[in-house]
Amino acid sequence: MLHRVPQRARQCTRVALAGFVGMLVDFAHRYGAQARADHRRFVDLFRNGRLPGP
C-alpha cells in the first residue's frame, strides 16, 4: 500500500532543503574566499622570507 505525503509537508520539505542548500552555498563561497586569502598571505610571507622556522 502506497501512502502519499500531504502537499503541505512536501512544500515544507522543499523550503527547508532550499534554505539548507543556500546556507551550504554561502558557506562554500566564504570558505573559498578565506582559503584564497590565506594562500595569498602564505605566498607573500614565503616569498619575502618572513615565515618563522628553524
Image (cartoon, rainbow, N blue to C red):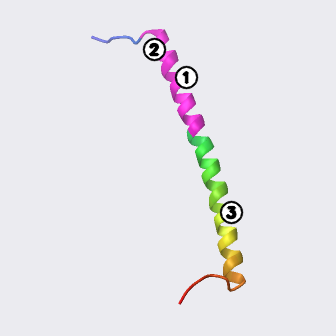
Q: Residue at x 62, y 81 (%)?
A: 51
Circle 2: residue type:
Ala
Circle 3: residue type:
Ala
Label 1 SS: helix
Q: Tell me where the magenta segment starts and ends, as one range.
A: 6-23
Residue 28 is tagged as none
Circle 1 Cα neighbour tier, 10 Å, few/some/many (<14 / 14–19 / ≥20): few
Contact (Cβ within 8 Å) of mark 1 with mark 3: no
Q: Residue at x 59, y 45 (%)?
A: 27
Vertical position of residue 41 compared to residue 27: above or below: below
Query: Quadrant of the rendered structure where residue 18 is?
Result: top right
Circle 3 Cα neighbour tier, 10 Å, few/some/many (<14 / 14–19 / ≥20): few
Where is residue 23 shown, x and y percent of the image?
A: 58, 37
Residue 14 lies in the magenta stretch = yes
Residue at mark 2: 9
Residue 15 is tagged as 1
> How far apart are labels 2 and 3 at the CA level?
42 Å
